[in-house]
Every structure is written in C-alpha cells, then in structure tokens.
Image: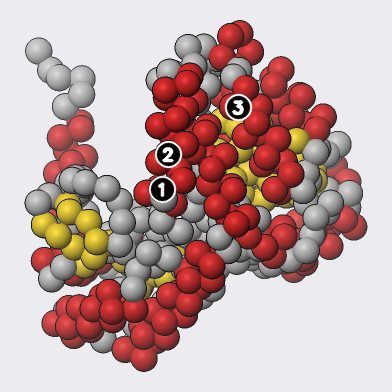
Amino acid sequence: MSDPLGFINAELDALKEKGLYRNLRVLQGEQGAEVNYDGKKVLQLSSNNYLGLNTHPRLRKAMIDAIEKYGAGSGAVRTIAGTMSLHEELEQKLAEFKHVGGTLVLQSGFTANMGVIPQVVDDGDLIISDQLNHASIIDGVRLSKAARAVYAHSDVNDLERVLKEKASQYRRILIITDGVFSMDGDIAPLPDIVSAAEKYNAIVMIDDAHASGVLGRNGRGTVDHFDLHGRVHIQVGTLSKAIGVLGGYIAGPAPLRDLLIHRSRPFLFSTSHPPAVAAACIAAIDVLLEEPQLIQRLWDNTKFFKDGLTRLGFNTGHSETPITPVIVGKGDLAMKFSDRLFANGVFAQGIGYPTVPEEKSRIRTIVTAQHTKEQLQFALDVLEKVGKELAII
C-alpha cells in the first residue's frame, strides 16, 4: 500500500541536497546577549529581543503578580467570557501610546494582519501591496476577496502608476506596507506613500512589527518617526519582538476596533491572552515610556556594528535599522557561513530561498540593547575570520 505522505521525504531530501535543511536550535536558558543553544554558549545575533525586555525585572514581576491574582489562563474567547480587566487596560494603554482612537490585541502579529485586512476590503475593492511585504500580509491579502496589485519595493513612482491605472475601477483602495522590512532592515518611504494615497483617497495600512519599540519617540513606531499621526489609518504591531512578550495588535480609529470585535475571525475564535502576558505587555509599555535609554543604547550598538561590517567589506544591502543582513548570494553558502559562525561562538541564522531570493541568501544579524561593545567586537572578529575562510570577503 502506497504512503500518501511519501512525497514529504522527497521534499526533505531535496532540501538536504541543496544544503538548506536545518535542525532547530534549542535554547537552554533565557534569551539574552549570550545564550546556550544545544549545549554551546554563543553570542546571540538572531533574536528579535531588541531591548532585552523579555528578562526585564518589571516584566518578570508583572507576570508573577498577575498569575497570583488572576491565574494561568483566561478560559475563553474575548466575546464570550474571556475579556479580563488586564486586556482592556492593555488596549487602552496601547491606544494612548500610539495616539489612536482604539486598539485590539490578538494572539500574534501574523493573526493581526489576517484579522484586519479581510474586514477592511472586500469584493469590488483593491489592495496594493509592497513587493517585499511580510508573509503575514500576503496571507491576509489572500483571505480577502479584494483584487490585488503589487508595486516595486519602496518605489513610490510605481505605486502611483498602479493608483493611476486602477483606482477608478474600484470602490475602496487599501495600500499596505511594512514599516521596517524584516529581511533587509530598510524603512518604508512612508511620507511619500501617504502623499500618494491622499491623492486617491486610499486607506494606508502599515505593519510596524520591527519598528515597534525601535523607531519613533519611546518606540512608538514608523508613524511617529515620520510624524504622520492622523494620516496613516491602520497600524499593525507586535508584542513579541521589542516589547518582549507575545501577541500582536491593530491600532486605528475606535470604530475600526468595534468592527473587528464583531467580525475579525482570529479574534472571535481564539482564546484571549493569559493574564500574565497582558500584564507583562502593560509593564513593557511603561518601560518604553520611562527608560528611553534602552532605545538609545540599541541605536548606539547598531551604529557600532554596522560600521564594523562596512569596514570589513561585507555586503549589508540597504539596511537602516538594527536588522543587518550579510548577503552572500547562495543558499548553501549562507548555511555554511551560519554553521561556521556557530562553531566559533556566534549565532547568526542563515536564510535562503524561499524566504529570500537565492541570489540574496544571507545571514541576518540583529543587535540589541543588551549587547556590550566588547561582545559586538568579538562578533565582528569572528565574522571577519569566517568570512575570509569562506572567501566571502
């Protein structure tokens, strides 16, 4: 009898032949600048823990206190019996932080995109999406019945071309872009995108997953970074990266929140956050407001590390943020580079096709506020050593 899932082994064998098959690294202990993966102590350069908030004393205490007071879980979806006072407090604090009328918290940034896009546009509408938008945006777009178009990455002239050609054919237009692009670390040209959208009365939506806690005053994100409050209609963010905990949120006008409560499927059909998670997210926002030196340290470390990579001759693309790729051009070489770095005490994950095009395969590095200059210099020394061994530089 044939195995209907037998094709899976062939798929895995193909990955192995291309040098792209990976085993999961297992973290033993807490996430920090120095970590223990698979029993080996290495310097972490692959975490999204930009500010080190996941181990911040205020977040730890908030979680413990919430467990003691509220228990381990919420017990239901928000619309039945699972809305707790902590959920409402978090959303109110987020709305004030983002300078919007309302926010809604979901289980992840991924589900936030899938939860909002199909509720904003439908059959007879058009979505215009940046070529390099995150997979969660792409999947959210696919869930909508709206027509779709793609403009060349961060190319506002191409965006305007699409608007000019198509806008008159549709009822509503939704333009979506990442704020910071997760693979290349570049920042969307949001002021020009907004200006183009306003000519055609289009809705502007931004995914600020990698800008939340990183860009703008106190980490308010790309909209604040460019001082575009009131001109960007929908913001999606994450509580899982710089915020240090778990979840995603949708920020916008209060009526949008009300509509999503009634229509957004990830919200309607998923149990709400454990109270400890909500409490830690509240504490994280307080830390952003009261300890801005963490963000300054992040950017100081970013400059130090980028300057070092440039001096060594690595190709870092167009990065403008703590996300800094080291592009090597072949998937198997990226994986070999990553493995050699790990053997020498630095964890920087290799990334190849289909996450990025084969010719742009890379390791992706992310520095954090937790790193010391000595640690970053160690990383640069290892990168130089391995880069020369593999003839990358």
**How would you rate the neighbour count of disc 3 (Cα within 10 Å): few for under 14, some for 14-19, many for 20 or more?**
many
Distance from the alpha carbon under mark 3 to that under mark 1: 21 Å
- Mark 3 near mark 1, Cβ–Cβ under 8 Å? no
- On the rendered structure, is 228 left or right of 388? right
Q: Residue furthest bottom?
A: 311
Q: Residue at x 46, y 46 (%)?
A: 58
Q: Is residue 342 above or below residue 205?
A: below
Point out residue 81 in the picture as x, y percentages from the top left corner: 58, 9
Q: Residue at x 66, y 27 (%)?
A: 88
Q: Report which quarter residue 388 is drawn in.
A: bottom left
- Report the amino acid beneath label 1: Pro
- Mark 1 near mark 2, Cβ–Cβ under 8 Å? yes
Q: Quadrant of the C terminus?
A: bottom left
Q: Secondary structure at mark 3?
A: helix
Q: Is residue 256 above or below residue 29?
A: above
- Report the amino acid beneath label 2: Lys
Residue bearing mark 1? 57
> In front: mark 3 or mark 2?
2
**How would you rate the neighbour count of disc 1 (Cα within 10 Å): few for under 14, some for 14-19, many for 20 or more?**
few
Sequence-first tag of 3 and 2 = 2
